[in-house]
Amino acid sequence: MKAPLALRLARRELRGGVRGLWTFLGCLALGVAAIATVGTLSEAFRASVAAEAASIMGGDLEVSLSSIPLKPAELQALTRLGRVSEVLEMRAMAENDAAPGAKRALVSLKAVDRAYPLLGAVTALPALEGAGSLADALAERGGVYGALVHPDLLARIQARVGDVIGVGDASFQIRGILTQEPDRAFRLLAFGPRLLVSLEGMESTGLARPGSMVRYEYRLALGAPAQTAEAARTLKQELDDPSIRVRTADEAAPTIRDGFTRLGGLMALVGLSALLLGGLGVSEAVSAYLESKTKTIATFKAVGAPGGLVFRVFFLQIMFLAACGIAVGLAVGAAVGYLGAPALAQVLPVAPKAGLYPKALALAGLFGALTAVAFALPPLSSRVHVSPLTLFRGYAAPERPRPGRAALAASALMGLALGWLVLESSPDARLGWGFIYSALGCTVAFWLAAKLLILVARALPRPRDPRLALAVTGLHRPGNPTGPVVACLGLGLTVLSAVALSDANFQHTMREELPAQAPSFFFLDVQPYQIDEFRQVLSSIEGVTRVEAAPSLRGRIVSVKGVPVENLQVPENVAWAVRGDRSLSTARGMSQGALITAGKWWPEDYSGPPLVSMDAEVAKGLGLRVGDRLSVSVLGREVELTVASLRRINWLSLSLNYAFILSPGVLDNDPMSYLATAYVDPSKPQAASEVYDRIGARFGNISIQRVDEALADVSNLAGQIAMAVRASAVVTLLAGLLVLAQSLRAAMARRQYETVIYKVCGATRRDIMTIMLCEHGMAGLAAGLAALMLGAGLSWFFVTRYMSVEWSFFAGPVLGVLGTAMALTLVMALSGMWRMLSGKAWPYLRNE
């Protein structure tokens, strides 16, 4: 059976090669590769988490609560279901008295029982060998318990394996360097190196007191893991305590998993920007290719081929090439994702599971196919309407026909499908809609910028220098490249400038603003009987300018306006408030720097029903207003609170801010500890050392966190994220360069005759290059200025709405983007002009 005529003709046409469509292939391949890479890595991370969830968590189920352990009856409910392992986690100070100056450091203290770990393995150096070796390593020997430590701790306190260090009231011998523990994988920021001890060793420290910031975790290994969901439901019913959290392995660490998903979604949107920008390259390449096929199309028409047949012939060609470009992009994306998984294992809490992920590849392929069709149909519909008269010498073709209505309708339908796919694949609806609005806004903005540049060039008085006059005239003459240059380069630079300005604002906030207003130290687990002496010791140190302290207790929101939190649809930006326990405080007077946005603060002598002052953003996310009610669970006791006021909180100030501050008397009978901060005069660096030494020596139970160390951890993590986003932005710029190259190539081809006229009239090669470089330089400058304005707007929106910090304009990224715009435009234009000027004039002057 013969193939359809259109297919046979398309196949024969392809034998002549695809010259002019390499940009088409490159744009599709680059955009699809970016989306496929991000999708593959995201799927690899999720697959690794799903496959190793139980080992990562340390059990099939986890039951956790703050401040107090499970009661014996509650613990018995767990042991009926399977094997149980008990784990305690808190922050503490470790001290090496043998080191010069008695070195101290904050540690992430973890105590485990003899059954730990139920799943997974703990590895250390020297190697732990034989059954029960972990318990033996942590056991008491000669009155001293053992400990395994992270190598960072050895450096901080100048200790070695075999040394004895102090924690609280107890001493521990370092018996190994901890290299792996199964249930630490989801903790990106631990604020202190790990110190692993036994439960008996923890008890000897005297740190785990009622009200202390201790996390009690109980892991279960079930005999039948397939019944995990049913076991979780049973435990929730039997325990019946809102302060107790029951999680399956699949629900472990939602903050990290969701955070990685949102990061992947953001990078995918930047990759999608590259693909949509490549859509312009598709349109330009198709136009240029079909323009080179003008005589072929006219020949088809001359021998009686209907327009529909011609359309199908070239549509099949373009779709075949699109499939090739998409296949290349998928292959590259899959390969980079596969090979990049081991590298990401060095920076991610869980090593991504390298492999092929059809869902991610199919999504990238679908994006590529929709983009190819959406951007190829209009120029294809326009270019196939060629008259057979063009075969005759001297015939001047009329203006380019407009695309047909059917083609425009189909293209619009593909665009709507792209928008729907963006929303469906985006982990955050706000990011999805923001991308769609940004794409539409940038398209309109650059179209207007190109039109404005043309109008300004037309209105300007003609310069005296004829070369400059011709350059200005070239911006508004028929067939000018102003629009393509401004749009293609501008869209890529918009993404780059938005990322650059956002990164500059973040770095400025971290390095400049925070140190000027942040406290120098945080102090955890200050007991009520210690608070007065604690204040006195700090106040007696010269250089300490301010001391703040507030009571703190962990609690959990259980219902909002009578609706259990499990049944609420909570926005992602405030989901943290209802996910697990939160810190609660109580106060009589309003805290310094608090900004009330609704309601009012209670009187200092207030003694009425329980009230709460909330963070305004959290209240908005939960649908709460002044006068509404919510219930919190505190140490197993449920308290109903009425919202008295809403506050705007600047979390980056690092002062003692709480999302929930309760009225006086609500927590008076509960065991609480204090969270405190100290501000040290930067001009007296010796004061910081004295604070560390005197508080550490006098109060062994108080944990001290230096703010600069905490900020360094946050900055390192943010730097890794910023690097990933910058890499995605560079991909977008590369797509813009491909499109720009195609646009300039087409413009140079159209100006070949114009160049010949210049030569015949006596213009030198230098004159011609000066004219065209000035013309393209002005277009590049316009693109850079437009990109800066749009990028600044996008950066402002992201920084103020998502990062919740003040936005500033920085000249460095501005000059970088402007310089990049002009340099890239001039270099690529120069490359095209050199080839064009190297050609001979006589072939264009022949009349035969």
Image (cartoon, rainbow, N blue to C red):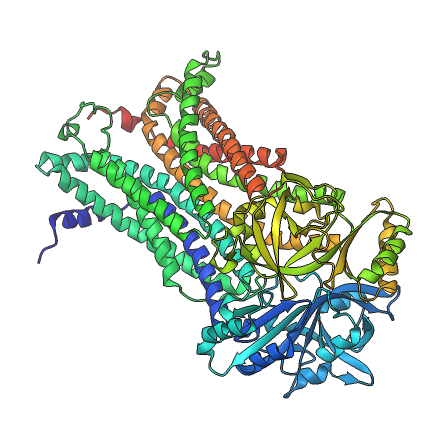
Total marks in image: 0
Residue 169 at x, y percent in the picture: 83, 73
Q: On the rendered structure, is 543 left or right of 319?
A: right
Q: On the rendered structure, is 710 left or right of 393?
A: right
157 or 255: nearer the viewer: 255
Residue at the (59%, 54%) spot, across then down: 720
Q: On the rendered structure, is 695 left or right of 340?
A: right
Residue 590 quadrant: top right
Q: Quadrant of the N terminus?
A: bottom left
578 or 133: nearer the viewer: 578
- One can see residue 216 in this view: yes
- One can see residue 833 in this view: no
Residue 429 at x, y percent in the picture: 44, 48
Would you place residue 741 above or below residue 536 in this image? above
Identify the residue at the far front of this view: 608
Residue 489 quadrant: top left
Residue at the (54%, 66%) spot, across then down: 252
Would you place residue 314 above or below residue 766 in this image? below
Residue 843 quadrant: top left
757 or 518: nearer the viewer: 518
Residue at the (33%, 41%) spot, across then down: 282
Residue 837 at x, y percent in the picture: 39, 30
Q: On the rendered structure, is 634 left or right of 203?
A: left
Q: Quadrant of the C terminus?
A: top left
659 or 219: nearer the viewer: 659
Residue 621 at x, y percent in the picture: 53, 48
